[in-house]
Image (tube, rainbow, N blue to C red):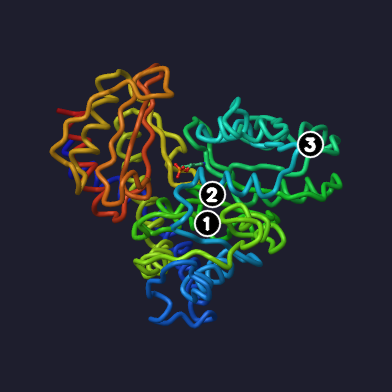
Amino acid sequence: MQIETLIKDCEKELSAQFAAREEIAYKNQVKVMEAFRKNKIALRHFVGTSGYGYGDEGRDTLNALFADIFGAEAALVSPNIVSGTHALTIALFGLLQSGDTLFSVSGDPYDTLREVISGKGIGSLADYGIAFKKCDLKGGKFDFEAIRQGLKDPTVKVVFIQRSRGYEWRDALSQKQIREACEFVRSCGFQGCIFTDNCYGEFVEDTEPTENGVDVAVGSLIKNAGGGIAPTGGYVVGKKEYIDRIAGRLTAPSIGAEVGSYAYGYQYFYEGVFMAPHVVCQALKGGLLIGACLEKLGFETSPSVTAMPCDITRAIRFNSAKELIGFIQAVQEASPVDSFVTLEPWDMPGYREQVIMAAGTFVQGASIELSADAPIKEPYIAYFQGGLTYEHCKYALTRILRKLCG
Ligand SMILES: *Cc1c(COP(=O)(O)O)cnc(C)c1O
């Protein structure tokens, strides 16, 4: 079949899915706009500051804006948070003390948190006497009986939920599932903090975890919430008492969120979150189109293109290392930055198998931009996400199809 025909057919079949994505984007844009109006965002909020940053109105107002967007009491949004892992780390260290237990109810947390939680002799939570335990999802759903058992332990102070699928062959958790889990956890008498790793999930549905019973949610600005425009940064949103404690970890317990300056100014953070609902919608539609075309060619994708996506990541199972590598190379060749680079698998530190990664992005490593990666092992699964514009995803798809069919 002609590549153009295949793409056109898939676009037609996806029209209801696309309309649903656009409706959610509109609801989120309304939410973001109401927060901009309420906080009376003005040009003066964008100016750079220096030194301690006492009375930095751009910073304080950005915090208030994020709190409103996420339906939370308070927020910490900062270029001084260097990544999602850093945001998650300061949040967990702010919430937990020696003798406490962190209880994950969605299985293993994301790879980069493993050492943060249980590393030896590197200042991990374990090194500070904070225990970790988990219960796995059962067929992609919360295992309520295991959660009930786990909560009998009075040292559990933080219940941890990862919204995104991360890099696993399972669906992300929906807001409905998260709301039910929060209600269940409370019905067990839990009085501590319900915590969500919100990475890859922001603006995918029309509510956020903090509107569904979660006390603290954490994410990166080089993913969804930065809208492809924020140059760096992370955020933590939630109950004020928790955010105050976490602010004491970001800076120091005596100064919290009262200090912190940014000489370049805050325009890109405001503009990024303003763009985010639309950009996330573009990435989701692009991911659906790529998924649908590859399903038509006989490849298995996760989530299936008929399911409602609950995060921006998508996985595709290929038949051979050659196909897998071809896919990742095509994504790189279709990137606006470093399109001329021919990718090869390499021995990346921390991985057992060779890894290949496409990230021809404006903001280094930004995974709200079209990006893909895969370990070279069976089953041959590529994970991809992002795309700032639907048209870019479609362009990349033409190159992917040429590589796979040619
Ligand atoms: C990306 C991601 C992280 C880590 O964020 P970095 O910005 O890469 O440090 C944590 N959890 C999930 C689910 C993620 O997708």
Which quadrant would the C terminus be assigned to in this image? top left
| Residue 31 visible at all | no
Q: Position of 90 compared to 385: left or right?
A: right
Q: Earlier in the sequence, mark 1 or mark 2?
A: 2
Q: Amino acid at mark 3?
A: Gly
Q: Is mark 1 within 8 Å of ligand 1?
A: no
Which quadrant would the N terminus be assigned to in this image? top left
Q: Is mark 2 within 8 Å of ligand 1?
A: yes
Q: Earlier in the sequence, mark 2 or mark 3?
A: 2
The residue that disc 3 covers is: 99
Instruction: Say if mark 1 contacts mark 2, CB within 8 Å.
Output: yes
Position above or below: 38 against 63: below
| Residue 338 visible at all | yes
Q: Which residue is pictured at 47% across the width and 33% down the height?
A: 167
Badge 3 element? loop
Q: Residues within 10 Å of mark 3 (few under 14, many from 20)?
A: few
Separation of marks 1 and 3 at Cα, in angstroms? 27 Å
Q: Position of 351 compared to 95: left or right?
A: left
Q: Nearer the viewer, mark 1 or mark 3?
A: 3
Q: Position of 148 compared to 271: left or right?
A: right
Badge 2 element? helix
Give the quadrant of residue 270. bottom left
The residue that disc 2 covers is: 87
Give the quadrant of residue 243. bottom right
Q: Residues within 10 Å of mark 1 (few under 14, many from 20)?
A: many
Q: Residues within 10 Å of mark 2 (few under 14, many from 20)?
A: many
Position above or below: 188 against 132: below
Of 130 and 207, nearer the camera is 130
Residue 105 % position (x, y):
69, 37
Residue 316 % position (x, y):
38, 31
The residue that disc 1 covers is: 235
